Amino acid sequence: MKIKPLLDRVLVQQEEAEETTKSGIVLASQSVEKPQIARVVAVGPGGIVDGEEVKMTLKAGDRVICAKYSGTEVKVDGEEFTIVRQSDVLAKVE
């Protein structure tokens, strides 16, 4: 199944959370925070949203930082994705 976001939406997939600290301590699975860094899987075409033109500046493959509690989580074919507005993406990671 292929998901194609509409308008100013971006489909992202969260990167795996670190399960060990820098000093080598293994963390319990419930104490691991949800990562905020994600990889862009698909991008909507942009268009007119709330009366204003929105141009998409992201592309598939970009690594981004999303707002912590933003978007809608979906599960497709056993994989978890989040659909967010482009405005909920805080930064690009290079």
Image (spheres, rainbow, N blue to C red):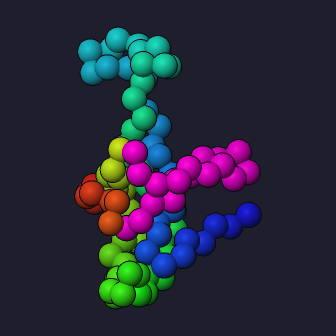
Q: Position of residue 69 (x, y in %)?
A: 40, 45
- Frontmost residue, 14 versus 5: 5
Q: Which residues are magenta?
A: 69-86
- Frontmost residue, 7 versus 51: 51
Q: Locate residue 35: give its quadrant.
A: top left
- In the displayed structure, does residue 61 sit left or right of residue 67? right
Q: Quadrant of the N terminus?
A: bottom right
Q: Residue at position x 46%, y 66% from top?
A: 10
Q: Locate residue 32: give its quadrant.
A: top left
- Frontmost residue, 31 versus 92: 31
* Magenta-span inclusion, residue 39: no
* One can see residue 41 in this view: yes
Q: Position of residue 56 (x, y in %)?
A: 37, 78
Q: Is residue 11 above or below residue 18?
A: below
- In the displayed structure, does residue 76 sit left or right of residue 11? right
* One can see residue 60 in this view: no
Q: Position of residue 15 (x, y in %)?
A: 45, 43
* Magenta-span inclusion, residue 71: yes
Q: Residue at position x 47%, y 69% from top?
A: 9
Q: Is residue 7 above or below residue 34?
A: below
Q: Residue at position x 51%, y 59% from top?
A: 83
Q: Main secondary structure of the magenta part?
A: strand
